[in-house]
Amino acid sequence: MKQSQSQTNVEFVVDLMEFSAHGALIQAFVLQALTYYAQKVAAAEPEALDTGMVSGHAWRGCALEIQRKLKQRLDS
């Protein structure tokens, strides 16, 4: 496992998914967390999600993309 200071976000997520004290259960946890948060964001009005750094429409678009990809993965 790499030091967290030098990890990219992708490396950090890979470490979460592959090197957990809870084994493969962490993968179900991470996917459930993605599902839960994507549902909350997708249900919100985009304007309510606006921040100084991110457009609410773009943030909601990310949630919809995650929902679509999770559905494709779980339905196949």
Image (cartoon, rainbow, N blue to C red):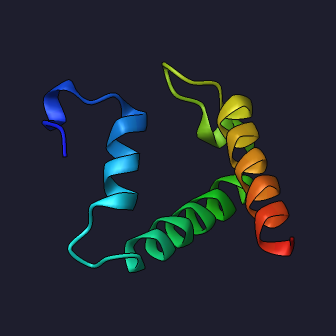
11 to 41, vertically: above or below = above
- The one of 8 and 40 positioned closer to us in this rendering: 8
Q: Is residue 10 above or below residue 64?
A: above
**Residue 74: % across, % down:** 77, 72
- Residue at (38%, 72%) from the top-left corner? 26
Residue 62 vs residue 8: left or right? right
The structure residue drawn at horizontal position 46% and vertical position 65%, both measured from the top left corner, is: 30
In the visual, does 34 lie left or right of 44? left
Q: Position of residue 66 (x, y in %)?
A: 70, 51
Could you say which is closer to the camera, residue 29 or residue 40? Answer: 29
Residue 67 falls left or right of residue 4: right
Quadrant hosting residue 2: top left
The mark tally for this picture is 0
Q: Residue furthest top?
A: 53
Q: Toward the viewer: 53 or 38?
A: 38
Image quarter where the C terminus lies is bottom right
For image coordinates 50% across by 75% down, the residue present is 28
> Left or right: 25 with respect to 5?
right
User: Can you say whether 67 is above or below 21 in the image?
Assistant: above
What residue is drawn where x is 41% and y is 76%? 24
In the image, residue 42 lies at what x, y percent?
73, 54
Q: What x and y, as percent, mark residue 63?
A: 69, 48
Above or below 76: residue 62: above
